[in-house]
Image (tube, rainbow, N blue to C red):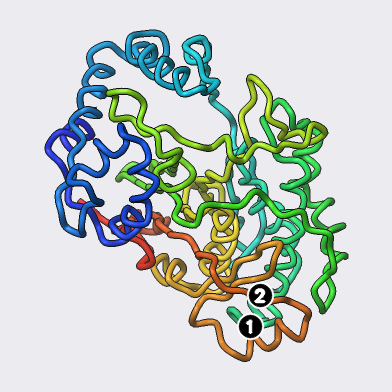
């Protein structure tokens, strides 16, 4: 924890994108005195390049470093957090913290053949309660199509991609919930090639009418950070973290310096839905780190932060790499499309001809949705050289040493 403690205690310069989002969050932060004291230290959001420090968070991290994680779940820090939440009328108790258990899970995966050499490409995602299966299901639906022939970001190509995503997101809205509420048989079926072939038959030359049930509204600012890392021994790490909305709940618990998340926003209020809010349940959530094996060897760690854009970005970036021969930076830079139950968004750089083609196919083009933030590390399997890519849409960067 030493590097994090140093950043919290000594401060760090605030980057441009984060500074803009911080400014947008000023009213919410100002509404909570504890949050305002920590995150509006001069009565305002930090400007780009300005140093920000959180010494109370540094003290909490020091406590954890000295006493171990049990101080958060069963000790004084946890008691302080629970007391603050309970005095506000919240439901999280010290008993909840004390009985918390994190789970080590196996990834879910699918394998396709790609490229002129027929490479075996295996996409790995996390299982429920995250929506990683959306990328797997959509990739499976498209597995038999010669997408390369259609041309990158052509109208026909984007139509197939967006229709496959629409089917997968429909399944997400119907089934995704706490892992104990998603039967293994259901998950196996949704990620199977047999099911994908069945779903592919539903895609024609025009948009398929469907009764989409919109997901809970996402906060456009977001709070997600994604990190990919690799070492000289061929190990890969794909890591993602988020409070959900920008600055989460906007509530700092007591004198901890810790901002509380608001991931519970993604529970359903429908008692008949598997994602219904209930004790001892985890909500549907959008965090989705990804990894790819090529010919049964680790090849790529990547992610595209941005709520519902995450599996959509996974699919499009992977196709850019495997189908259209882009390098890792090009694959992340390329303009993206985004499915939403209310319509589709096309990023600047997608041609007017492609947009017109999609309109003629029955798609409604809308504005106002983001296209995520990509980061990735790829291993050249012939040389062992590491290649990094970082999305210019965000504050990220690629580093090697």
Q: CA distance from mark 2 to mark 1?
A: 6 Å
Q: Nearer the viewer, residue 29 or 274?
A: 29
Disc number placed over residue 154 in the picture, else none? 1
Query: Is 299 left or right of 397, judged from the image as shown?
Result: right
Q: Residue furthest left?
A: 10
Q: Position of residue 12 (x, y in %)?
A: 17, 46
Residue at x 66% of width, y 63% of height: 340
- Say which quarter of the image contains residue 155: bottom right
Residue at x 71% of width, y 62% of height: 341
Which residue is labeled 2 in the image?
Answer: 158
Mark 2: few, some, or many residues within 10 Å (few <14, many ≥20)? many
Q: Position of residue 303 (x, y in %)?
A: 47, 52
- Say which quarter of the image contains residue 79: top left
Residue 400 in view of the camera: yes
Q: Nearer the viewer, residue 229 or 29?
A: 29
Mark 1: few, some, or many residues within 10 Å (few <14, many ≥20)? some
Asked if disc 2 and disc 1 are in contact, CB closer than 8 Å, the reply is yes
Q: Position of residue 348 (x, y in %)?
A: 49, 80
- Say which quarter of the image contains residue 163: bottom right
Q: Nearer the viewer, residue 351 or 173?
A: 173
Query: Is 321 left or right of 128, judged from the image as shown?
Result: left
Q: Position of residue 304 (x, y in %)?
A: 48, 56
Residue at x 33% of width, y 30% of height: 258
Disc number placed over residue 261 in the picture, else none? none
**Viewport quadrant of the N terminus:** top left
Residue 143 in view of the camera: no
Q: Which structural element holds mark 1?
A: loop
Query: Is 117 left or right of 331, judged from the image as shown?
Result: right
Query: Is 118 left or right of 143, judged from the image as shown?
Result: left
Query: Up-down: is 295 above or below 234?
Result: below
Q: Which structural element holds mark 2?
A: helix
């Amino acid at each position: 924890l030493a590097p994090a403690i140093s950043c919290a205690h000594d401060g760090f310069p605030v980057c441009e994108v984060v500074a803009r989002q911080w400014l947008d969050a000023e009213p919410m932060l100002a509404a909570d005195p504890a949050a305002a004291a920590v995150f509006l230290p001069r009565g305002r959001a930090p400007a780009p390049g300005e140093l920000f420090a959180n010494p109370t968070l540094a003290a909490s991290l020091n406590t954890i470093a000295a006493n171990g994680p049990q101080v958060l779940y069963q000790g004084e820090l946890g008691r302080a957090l629970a007391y603050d939440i309970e005095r506000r009328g919240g439901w999280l108790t010290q008993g909840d913290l004390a009985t918390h258990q994190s789970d080590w899970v196996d990834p879910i995966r699918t394998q396709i053949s790609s490229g002129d050499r027929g490479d075996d490409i295996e996409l790995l995602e996390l299982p429920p309660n995250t929506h990683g299966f959306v990328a797997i299901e959509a990739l499976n639906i498209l597995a038999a199509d010669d997408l390369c022939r259609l041309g990158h970001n052509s109208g026909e190509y984007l139509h197939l991609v967006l229709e496959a995503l629409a089917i997968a997101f429909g399944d997400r809205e119907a089934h995704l919930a706490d892992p104990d509420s998603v039967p293994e048989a259901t998950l196996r079926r949704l990620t199977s090639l047999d099911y994908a072939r069945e779903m592919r038959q539903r895609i024609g030359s025009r948009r398929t009418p469907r009764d989409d049930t919109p997901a809970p509204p996402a906060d456009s600012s977001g709070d997600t950070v994604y990190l990919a890392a690799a070492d000289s021994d061929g190990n890969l790490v794909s890591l993602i973290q988020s409070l959900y909305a920008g600055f989460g709940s906007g509530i700092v618990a007591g004198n901890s310096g810790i901002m509380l998340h608001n991931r519970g926003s993604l529970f359903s209020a429908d008692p008949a839905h598997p994602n219904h809010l209930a004790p001892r349940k985890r909500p549907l959530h959008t965090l989705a780190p990804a990894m790819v094996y090529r010919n049964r060897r680790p090849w790529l760690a990547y992610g595209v932060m941005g709520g519902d854009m995450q599996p959509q970005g996974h699919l499009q970036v992977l196709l850019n790499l495997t189908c259209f021969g882009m390098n890792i930076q090009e694959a992340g830079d390329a303009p993206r499309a985004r499915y939403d139950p209310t319509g589709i968004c096309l990023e600047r750089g997608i041609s007017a001809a492609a947009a017109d083609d999609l309109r003629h196919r029955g798609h409604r083009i809308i504005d106002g949705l983001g296209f995520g933030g990509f980061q990735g590390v790829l291993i050249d399997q012939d040389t062992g050289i590491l290649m990094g890519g970082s999305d210019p849409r965000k504050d990220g960067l690629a580093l090697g040493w």
